[in-house]
Image (spheres, rainbow, N blue to C red):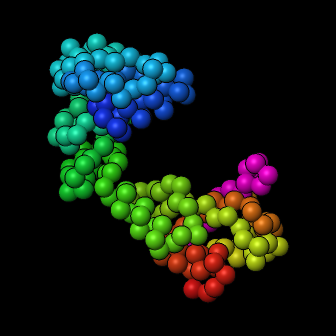
Amino acid sequence: MKVIVVGCGRVGAELALSVAARGIQVSVIDRDPGSFQRLPSRFVGDTVQGDVLDLAVLHRAGIENADGFAAATPSDETNLVAARIARDLFDIPNVVARVYSPQHGSIFARAGIPTVVSSSWSANRMEQLLRHPGLIEVASAGHGEVRFVEVKIPEHLAGKPVSILLEKDASHPVTLVRGGSAVLVSLETTLEQADLVVIAVQPSHLPKLNALIAGGSA
């Protein structure tokens, strides 16, 4: 598998390092050669200096053989154009872009480009930590209509069934981790203290779930 990361800022460099550490071939493109200093000596991927909108630069990065493409430059316009080139011209099946301005998110959506809106994600994550400190959000689906939260079972819920954490049509259990091993979970599974339960939940149920974990009522 080969991935191209465009933009070697903090996000791009961290992404490239993380992907390379998993044994995936990575090429990083940036017009500023000094930006590659963000990559530590242990980085085993390739670096390509140049403008991502220059087809010759993309060819030097090996875009013909790429399976994934991440546009993470500081420019939303550049990210959009680069992502569309990668998808439409080179038929890369997995393309994602970083969006700095939330107002531009709809443009990427209309183009069918999956995005990460950094400011919106940070704000939503901080709000979640402030409002629901007993829960850890590990992922979300769609535009956040469904969230996956990890719940550490406190002593007062030990011995109770998983169903006590749920609300009809608003949440569903996914997995349970006990003693380092993960298993699929049913509504009848008995909880033990320190179990980690991942639940798919609609945001409307989070206050009630948080109150339950804290030992109170919604």
Q: Provide residue 213's location: percent of width, then percent of height.
A: 64, 75
Q: Quadrant of residue 79?
A: top left
Residue 71 is drawn in which quadrant? top left
Query: In the displayed image of the protein, which residue is found farthest to the bottom?
Result: 217
Question: Is residue 69 among the parts visible in the rendering?
Answer: no
Left of 205 or right of it: where is 61? left
Front-most of residues 168 and 133 = 133
Pinpoint residue 42: horizontal percent, then vertical percent.
Answer: 49, 21
Q: Residue at x 46, y 67 (%)?
A: 128
Q: Is residue 127 above or below residue 66?
A: below
In the picture, measured across the screen, residue 143 lies left or right of residue 185, that is left
Residue sitting at x 46%, y 71%? 130
In the rendered structure, which segment of residues is drawn in magenta?
A: 169-184
> What quarter of the picture does the C terminus occupy?
bottom right
Is residue 212 positioned above or below 202 on the image? below
User: Residue, x 31% and y 55% (percent of image)?
Assistant: 119
Relative to residue 142, is residue 4 depicted above or below?
above
Q: Looking at the magenta stretch, what is its main secondary structure?
A: strand
| Residue 187 percent location from the top left of the image | 74, 68
Q: Position of residue 5 (x, y in %)?
A: 35, 29
Q: Quick check: 47 left or right of 158?
A: left
Q: Depth check: 129 or 66 in front?
A: 129
Whether 178 is among the magenta residues is: yes
- Left or right, residue 72 beside residue 179: left
Looking at the picture, tell me which residue is in the foreground, 123 or 166: 123
